[in-house]
């Protein structure tokens, strides 16, 4: 067992080249904040990128930032905040959910896990903001893709190809992201007392309005008390976030309140609480309970989310809440994950995917953590993996089983 | 035009042409196979009309099983295939090959599903970009990416080219506005990526497919995100004595946290050509003209328009007008939208380039272009998507003058080299195709390009789909698969290990 701690991209190249030559697998980690996600990796050595750190370029007026892969996300977010900018994809922090600390994780990890947050429905995920990368393939060859400009169709978009690849295709050493101005202010409109189906309809109406909603979540009775220090206990809340310039936020809040009034009583959550609430929604606060109880992250057609839950509950018990207009369902299982049942139901309701983001190691070793693909697609993914990492030395087994 | 060097035609395929045509007629009965010279003429080029080539045969399938059977047939017989949507590519992406089946997707022209609750439209790939907006407009929705060819270009082609438009700084490119596709691999296998849900369950194959220029698969269905139309839009028309000041104004607008729906710049030659053509009321005594369009809720647009006006003043704007009606706003755009035909009036021919640069490099690139213009003895006019740094220099030339076309092409290539040199890229939205294929090594090393080709190997190991596009050389997959093994010492033996 050796831990390599490269300080430069040349060190990374040398290490991967050596590992490829020896055909010895590497577990690639940043700060290890998401190490508990995925199938257990069987690797003799560890490639620890946390020493490959530093912001190498930041030009606020050009909306661009470059950093080495091991740069702490927190460091980047602090610098951006000083300039009233942000990573608009609102990367979630898995730390508390997985029993770790808040505020850890690297920029490389954000791409490898294709992180996003409630704003995913308006601004996209990490994949939508990555502009360029430098990386080392499992072949032990350095390559780059993309650049530092927003509009670029020169060659295949390998940067997107690496988004959500969990370190199984290549080791990214440098990344360039598009950054955006942070909203001047925000407020949240809450509608009280809707059941899951009514909430789905209300959220669809809001998203289809001129309200430019940047977050649409439904917090059923079973979880609502876990948010904002139990300040909003009791009836379910359907919450809609409005961000932007002050006058615009007030104008849209008013518009949405009138639009949703027929659904139920509305109230406004002011800026500070609104920020806290959406961070808690983003980071799955209600289920960050220090237990290893299985947690599913389910992405389906927004209008179908509550139907999936309804059907699933006939087979097994789960506590849930919805983000992304109802299309992202966080499910905390009462007992076993029931992967097959859940995935069958998802297929029945128009398709999507379920990822078992938290479960004991033995469970993650036994069932597919990531949604299994149709045979033709699984074969294509396997061929892609082979073209990047023919000796299967990068995080072997983490996404797909052997 | 002399024409690019294309892959050598396969003699065996050419000899079997009649047999292939007959087989295609079995797969696609009726009028779906076009084989006569006179009828194939319409397909011999795309939007890059300087390059022409008659295909082996043109096939216009109507169903997914037909596409699947055509590709399977060609795969089994090692026959090349060039996919084509509406044929509006400006980079020769749909240029036929002599020994290839030209697979035209224009009969896939139906919208299959409009789902307002989930803000998604499922369309066949031959539906035009504008066709999607037209289908949902009555409910106040639209599809955001708006390439200038949107009246004709197909949504399948948009996926292949990752098309942009003037609104992409705020609303993103095709890649950010599609949710899923169905596609057929070269083997004939039909696969679905994404759907109405978000994100991929595994690798982001949708991300790789978007902008792959028809080299990886044939798109047979697209699910796009539709958006509610902004409540209102207002524009400013601002003139500056120099491009530096205009550029600084753009930087200050963005620095103030304002992301306009559209932000376009024109240089003096482009302003004059446009004004002479459409009489939009553009100021003629300025060096740079900026059109800034703010869209969104009424309260927001009214709030921001004053701030932009102040920033323009602070940056030395000599003229500044704010639109007070939709009619006036459209008049600001009239000259910009007519810029290409306007330039077409003052020169027998023009060659449209498409580099992207970091915005701050604009003055340097413009002055470099002036030097090149003198060197080549050819004029150049510039329109510029100022928000995202995408530059469209129009090189003016006369194809009837011997050697002038070649000079224009060299001039264009030098402009793109300059873009790369200042940290930009070869193409922002028109694609590599055949046009910029041979410039790829300006931006990429052999290792960079080989890794891209390996992606193609995962999808199409025999290089049958659209060869001769994007890559200057398509190395054989078997060759690329070989690994040079470096056996040696464990790296950094001096480091402490745990």
Image (tube, coloured by chain):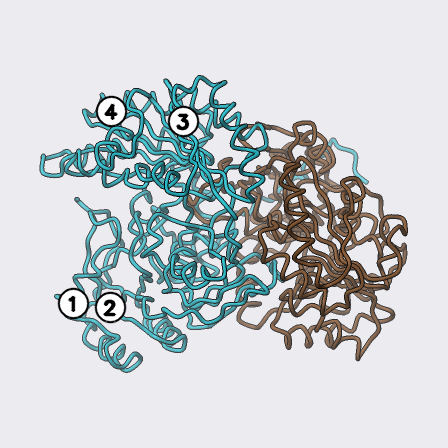
Chain colours: A brown, B cyan
* Residue holding disc 2: B58
- Name which of mark 3 and mark 1 comes first in the sequence: 1
Quarter the C terminus of chain A occupies: bottom right
* Residue holding disc 4: B373
What x and y, as percent, mark residue B495?
A: 75, 32
Q: Nearer the viewer, mark 2 or mark 4?
A: 4
Please give the label number shown on residue B39.
1
What x and y, as percent, mark residue B331?
A: 34, 38
Callout 3: helix, strand or loop? strand
Labelled pair 1, 2 in contact (Cβ < 8 Å)? yes
Q: Is residue B80 left or right of residue A129?
A: left
Q: Nearer the viewer, mark 3 or mark 2?
A: 3
* Residue holding disc 3: B238
Depth check, front residue: B360 or A108: B360
Q: Can you say whether A9 is above or below B60 in the image?
A: above
Q: Chain of mark 2?
A: B
Q: Chain of mark 3?
A: B
Marks 3/2: CA distance? 49 Å
Q: Nearer the viewer, mark 4 or mark 3?
A: 3
């Amino acid at each position: 067992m050796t831990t390599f701690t490269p300080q430069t991209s040349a060190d990374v190249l040398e290490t991967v080249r050596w590992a490829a030559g020896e055909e010895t697998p590497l577990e690639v980690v940043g700060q290890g904040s998401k190490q508990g996600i995925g199938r257990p990796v069987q690797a003799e050595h560890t490639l620890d990128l946390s020493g490959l750190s530093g912001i190498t370029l930041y030009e606020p007026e050009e909306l661009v930032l470059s950093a080495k892969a091991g740069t702490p996300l927190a460091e980047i977010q602090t610098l951006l905040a000083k300039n009233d900018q942000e990573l608009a994809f609102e990367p979630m922090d898995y730390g508390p959910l997985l029993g770790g600390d808040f505020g850890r994780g690297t920029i490389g990890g954000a791409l490898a896990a294709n992180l996003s947050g409630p704003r995913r429905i308006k601004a996209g995920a990490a994949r939508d903001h990555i502009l360029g990368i430098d990386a080392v393939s499992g072949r032990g060859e350095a390559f780059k893709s993309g650049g530092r400009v927003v509009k670029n169709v020169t060659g295949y978009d390998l940067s997107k190809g690496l988004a959500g690849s969990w370190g199984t295709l290549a080791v990214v050493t440098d990344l360039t992201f598009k950054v955006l101005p942070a909203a001047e202010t925000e407020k949240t409109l809450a509608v009280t007392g809707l059941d899951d189906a009514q909430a789905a309809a209300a959220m669809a109406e809001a998203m289809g309005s001129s309200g430019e909603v940047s977050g649409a979540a439904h917090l059923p009775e079973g979880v609502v008390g876990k948010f904002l220090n139990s300040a909003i206990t009791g009836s379910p809340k359907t919450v809609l976030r409005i961000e932007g310039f002050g006058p615009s936020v007030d104008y849209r809040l008013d518009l949405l309140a009138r639009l949703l009034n027929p659904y139920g009583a509305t109230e406004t959550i002011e800026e500070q609480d609104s920020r806290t609430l959406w961070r808690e929604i983003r980071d799955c606060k209600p289920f960050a309970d220090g237990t290893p109880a299985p947690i599913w992250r389910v992405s389906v057609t927004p209008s179908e989310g509550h139907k999936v839950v309804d059907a699933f509950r006939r087979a097994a018990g789960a506590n849930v809440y919805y983000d992304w207009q109802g299309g992202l369902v966080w499910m905390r299982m009462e007992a076993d994950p029931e992967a097959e049942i859940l995935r069958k139901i998802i297929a029945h309701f128009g398709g999507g995917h379920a990822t078992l983001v938290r479960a004991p190691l033995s469970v993650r070793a036994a069932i597919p953590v990531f949604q299994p693909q149709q045979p033709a697609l699984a074969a294509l993914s396997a061929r892609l993996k082979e073209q990047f990492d023919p000796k299967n030395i990068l995080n072997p087994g983490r996404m797909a089983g052997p | 035009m002399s024409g690019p060097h294309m892959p050598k035609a396969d003699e065996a395929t050419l000899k079997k042409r009649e047999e292939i045509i007959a087989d295609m007629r079995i797969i696609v009965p009726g009028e779906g196979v076009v084989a006569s010279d006179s009828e194939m003429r319409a397909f011999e080029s795309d939007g890059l009309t300087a390059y022409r080539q008659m295909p082996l045969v043109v096939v216009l399938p109507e169903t997914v099983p037909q596409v699947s059977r055509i590709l399977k047939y060609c795969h089994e017989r090692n026959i090349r295939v060039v996919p084509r949507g509406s044929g509006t590519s400006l980079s020769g992406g749909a240029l036929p090959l002599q020994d290839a089946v030209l697979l035209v997707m224009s009969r896939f022209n139906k919208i299959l599903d409009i789902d307002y609750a989930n803000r998604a439209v499922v369309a066949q790939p031959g539906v035009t970009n504008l066709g999607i907006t037209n289908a949902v407009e009555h409910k106040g929705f639209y599809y955001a990416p708006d390439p200038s060819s949107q009246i004709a270009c197909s949504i399948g082609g948009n996926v292949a080219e990752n098309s942009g438009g003037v609104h992409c700084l705020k609303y993103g490119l095709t890649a950010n506005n599609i949710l899923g596709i169905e596609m057929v691999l070269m083997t004939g296998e039909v696969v679905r990526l994404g759907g109405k849900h978000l994100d991929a369950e595994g690798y982001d194959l949708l991300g790789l497919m978007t902008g792959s220029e028809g080299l990886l698969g044939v798109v047979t269905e697209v699910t796009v995100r539709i958006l509610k139309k902004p409540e209102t839009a207002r524009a400013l028309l601002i003139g500056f004595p120099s491009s530096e000041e205009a550029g600084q104004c753009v930087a200050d607008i963005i620095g103030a946290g304002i992301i306009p729906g559209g932000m376009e710049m024109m240089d003096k030659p482009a302003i004059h050509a446009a004004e002479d053509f459409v009489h939009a009321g553009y100021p003629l005594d300025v060096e740079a003209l900026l059109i800034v369009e703010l869209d969104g809720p009424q309260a927001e647009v009214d709030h921001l328009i004053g701030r932009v006006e102040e920033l323009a003043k602070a940056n030395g704007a000599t003229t500044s007008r704010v639109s007070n009606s939709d009619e006036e706003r459209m008049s600001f755009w009239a000259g910009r939208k007519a810029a290409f035909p306007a330039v077409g009036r003052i020169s027998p021919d023009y060659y449209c380039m498409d580099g992207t640069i970091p915005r701050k490099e604009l003055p340097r690139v413009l002055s470099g272009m002036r030097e090149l213009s003198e060197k080549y003895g050819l004029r150049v006019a510039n329109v510029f998507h100022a928000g995202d740094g995408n530059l469209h220099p129009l090189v003016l030339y006369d194809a009837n003058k011997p050697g002038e076309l070649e000079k224009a092409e060299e001039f264009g290539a030098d402009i793109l080299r300059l873009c790369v040199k200042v940290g930009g890229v070869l193409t922002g939205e028109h694609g590599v195709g055949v046009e910029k294929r041979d410039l790829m090594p300006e931006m990429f090393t052999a290792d960079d390009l080989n890794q891209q080709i390996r992606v193609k190997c995962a999808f199409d190991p025999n290089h049958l789909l659209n060869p001769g596009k994007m890559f200057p050389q398509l190395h054989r997959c078997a060759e690329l698969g070989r690994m040079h093994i470096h056996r040696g010492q464990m790296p950094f033996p001096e480091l402490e290990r745990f």
